[in-house]
Image (cartoon, grey):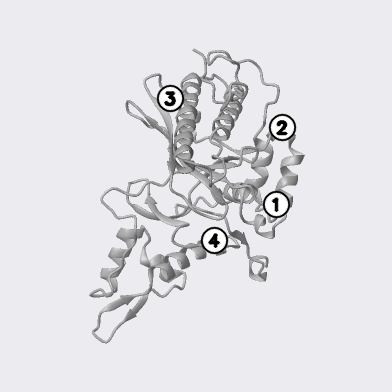
């Protein structure tokens, strides 16, 4: 079974990390290792992009990749030993690199005739080709059964640094594969000071570090590839039977009524806010409870979690913190974009 040509011209095919046939898996010329850079980023919040780049340069075997695949992907791999699994993981990362690179944007001048139509058609074509390519690879490596497939679906995103956003998921009989959000980055001037907190280097390194907080309110970063300009994170689906938009009443009968509604919509216990010194609202002249604005409460709570680790999110707003689900399927607020997280240089964190 031959892998499809993922190039846009006959002479530009998507290079495969495992030969010309999906059943053939020859040795790699380059075999990236992930323990070096990954361990550094996990153990230390690396402040500047320059330092992050130097860490990658000092670990040539990383090949620009840091992080790990989801656990429920790894347990399915066709391997008998840890070494075999490591080798397969490397091949999977390079397979993903090729597929994501194929999703390059349509670069024709926007004034070109039929620009919008051609752009949409080409992007749909590339998404389909990359999905078919990944399906064959995932079946071969044992991540999904032969009866199932994986697909990429473009999601609506906007932001100064994000280029495209994709859902990577499984379909077929009893799909159980962890859903992944693929965030691809725009090309930006690496000399800008904001690159210390935003972009492919900062968001990958800082995301892996934030994983160590083991916080349910921060989406997990699994891995990233700075050569392919993307990171892969936990995909947040809105909870069933619950609106993904937090909406408070203007007033409640009492504080307890508000506490119950607040928990139902956000997964946050009001007592947690109050313990952190966050005032949830006030009792008005009618003896009813008036909550503060949702942004003040939710953003304030999330910032307090980061502050405990000596960090601060400089760009935390409603689009960066959304409603996802906890392990039980109930609503929970999560930080989904860590671009903007930085160190707090305050003596109280270093005493």
User: Would you say the residues marked 1 and 3 are in contact, meaning their CB atoms lie under 8 Å apart?
Assistant: no
Horizontally, residue 261 falls left or right of residue 13, namely left
Q: Which mark's residue is nearer the viewer, 1 or 3?
A: 1
Mark 1 to mark 3: distance in Å?
38 Å
Residue labelled with disc 3: 144
Mark 2 to mark 4: distance in Å?
32 Å
For this rendering, which residue is in front, 9 or 38?
9
Which circle's residue, 3 or 2, is located before the other in the chain? 2
The location of residue 323, given as percent across then percent down, is: 38, 54
Mark 3 to mark 2: distance in Å?
28 Å
Q: Which mark's residue is nearer the viewer, 2 or 4?
A: 2
Asked if residue 205 shows in the view, the reply is: yes
Residue labelled with disc 4: 306
Residue labelled with disc 1: 190
SS for tag 2? helix
The location of residue 55, given as percent across then percent down, is: 73, 44
Compared to residue 318, the image places residue 168 above or below, namely above
Which circle's residue, 1 or 4, is located before the other in the chain? 1
Which circle's residue, 1 or 3, is located before the other in the chain? 3
What crowding class fits label 3: few (fewer than 14 Cα within 10 Å), some (14-19), or many (20 or more)?
A: many
Mark 1 to mark 4: distance in Å?
26 Å
Horizontally, residue 102 falls left or right of residue 246, namely right
SS for tag 4? helix
Residue labelled with disc 2: 61
Asked if residue 77 shows in the view, the reply is: no
Which circle's residue, 2 or 4, is located before the other in the chain? 2
Compared to residue 6, the image places residue 341 above or below, namely below
């Amino acid at each position: 079974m031959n892998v499809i040509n993922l190039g846009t011209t006959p002479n530009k095919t998507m290079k495969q990390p495992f030969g010309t046939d999906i059943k053939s898996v020859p040795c790699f010329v380059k075999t990236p290792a992930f323990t070096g850079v990954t361990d550094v980023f996990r153990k230390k919040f690396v402040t500047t992009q320059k330092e992050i780049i130097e860490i990658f340069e000092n670990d040539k075997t990383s090949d620009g990749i840091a992080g790990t695949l989801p656990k429920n992907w790894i347990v399915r791999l066709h391997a008998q030993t840890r070494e075999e699994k490591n080798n397969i993981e490397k091949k999977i990362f390079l397979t993903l690199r090729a597929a994501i690179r194929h999703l390059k944007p349509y670069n024709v001048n926007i004034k070109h005739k039929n620009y919008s139509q051609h752009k949409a058609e080409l992007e749909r074509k590339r998404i389909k080709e990359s999905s078919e390519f990944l399906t064959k690879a995932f079946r071969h490596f044992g991540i999904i059964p032969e009866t199932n497939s994986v697909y990429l679906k473009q999601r609506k995103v906007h932001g100064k640094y994000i280029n495209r956003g994709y859902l990577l998921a499984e379909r077929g009989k009893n799909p159980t594969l962890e859903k992944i959000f693929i965030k691809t980055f725009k090309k930006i001037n690496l000399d800008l000071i904001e690159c210390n907190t935003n972009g492919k280097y900062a968001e990958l390194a800082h995301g892996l570090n934030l994983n160590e907080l083991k916080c349910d309110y921060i989406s997990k970063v699994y891995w990233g590839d700075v050569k392919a300009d993307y990171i892969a994170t936990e995909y947040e689906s809105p909870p069933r039977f619950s609106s993904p938009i937090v909406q408070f009443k203007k007033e409640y009968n009492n504080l307890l009524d508000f506490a119950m509604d607040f928990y139902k919509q956000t997964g946050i216990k009001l007592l947690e806010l109050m313990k952190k010194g966050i005032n949830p609202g006030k009792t008005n002249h009618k003896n009813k409870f008036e909550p503060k604005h949702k942004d003040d409460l939710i953003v304030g709570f999330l910032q307090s979690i980061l502050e405990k680790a000596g960090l601060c999110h400089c760009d935390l707003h409603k689009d960066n913190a959304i409603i996802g689900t906890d392990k039980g399927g109930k609503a929970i607020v999560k930080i989904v974009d860590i671009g903007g997280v930085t160190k707090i240089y305050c003596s109280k964190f270093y005493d």
